[in-house]
Image: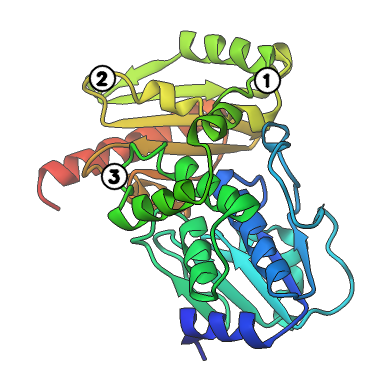
Amino acid sequence: MTMAGKAELLRWLAEDDDFLVASHYNPDGDALGATAAMGFILSALGKRFVLYNQTGVPRHYDWLPWPAPLATVLPEREFARLILLDCGDLPRAGRELAQRMPGLICANIDHHLGNPNFCQVNWVDTRRSSTGEMVGELAEELGVPLSGDLGLAVYVSLVTDTGFFAYSNSSPACLRMAARIVELGLDPAAVSEKIENQWTPAKLKLLARVLESMSLHHDGRIAVIKISRALLADSGASPAETEGLINYVRRLRGLDIAVALREENEHRVKFSLRSGGEVDVQRVAASFGGGGHRNASGGQVLGSLAEAERAVVSAAALSLAAREAGL
């Protein structure tokens, strides 16, 4: 039975002890910020906790402070409660944690469309800018101020999931939370410097190669960049360094949907979709079993890069046609 989400979470945090806190593998800024923030809350409340992520901290976020080490191997012992952050569905937590789920009492804190409410306690609010915003709200309701490292962790979630407050999910609530964090001493320019200026020469080389091979479809309304395993190896970039490349494609005038395809192996391709305004790419991702947000979604396609390009472009074009037909 699903319990009332936020109220039950507040009760857990106030009354219970010994938490396992986790987020989706290959974490982005929101997943990392939310995980660190939850750890800082638990530390402030004097709770025992373990922080876990299957793939750990990406190199470009190695400056982010943590209240405890982020484990990449799931402890074998039992925990009283699991708090799962920013996972649109259970598989995103990783195979190791998903296999342990039947024996865990779990809370699901998330803001993605299509989340199936897979825990006993679910607080899923698609109106929120980020999962970090939701964790920040829990902190404030528990009387833990959004200052110092906690404030920094929440702020990282806010700015990375809103494109530094440039995306449509930049709600008044998240802007007010950011303002409160800044009032408590955070330096926005210093944080921006740390997030934005972490590129390696390999990533810059990869960007040049990716943009050079970009293809346009549907009269320039759909753009595709492709990242093969060979291209990654040639540039020397890691898979984590492909994050954010798609945002350069979004700058094209007249573009409705940007598509990034990354070859995982010979038979599977990961895709990311970005759009603006009322163009809903979550529906496109959902047609392949993926998900996310209206303007930022993703998933995977079985097949080669060329097959994935044909399939995703076709689905994106159908989505645009349906929107124009009012469907």
State the image quarter where residue 107 is shown. bottom right
Whether tag 1 and tag 2 are in contact, CB under 8 A, the answer is no
**From the viewer's perspective, is the residue at label 1 or at label 3 nearer?**
3
Is residue 323 in view from this perspective? yes
Whether tag 1 and tag 3 are in contact, CB under 8 A, the answer is no
Q: Residue furthest right?
A: 76
Q: Is residue 200 above or below residue 266?
A: above
Residue at x-position 33% and y-position 47%: 170
Residue carrying label 2: 220
Residue carrying label 3: 168
Q: Residue 165: percent from the left, percent from the top?
A: 36, 40
Q: Residue 201: percent from the left, percent from the top?
A: 67, 11
**Residue 3 marker:** none
Q: Residue 168: percent from the left, percent from the top?
A: 29, 45
SS at circle 1: helix
Give the side of residue 313 with respect to residue 15, left or right.
left
Residue at x-position 51% and y-position 60%: 88
Q: Residue furthest left?
A: 325
Which of marks 3 and 1 precedes in the sequence? 3
Give the Cα distance between marks 1 and 2: 26 Å
Give the side of residue 90 with respect to residue 220, left or right.
right
Q: Nearer the viewer, residue 22 or 159?
A: 159
Residue at x-position 48% and y-position 84%: 7
State the image quarter where residue 234 is shown. top right
Which of marks 2 and 1 precedes in the sequence? 2
Residue carrying label 1: 232
Mark count: 3
What amino acid type is highlighted by mark number 3? Ser
What amino acid type is highlighted by mark number 1? Leu
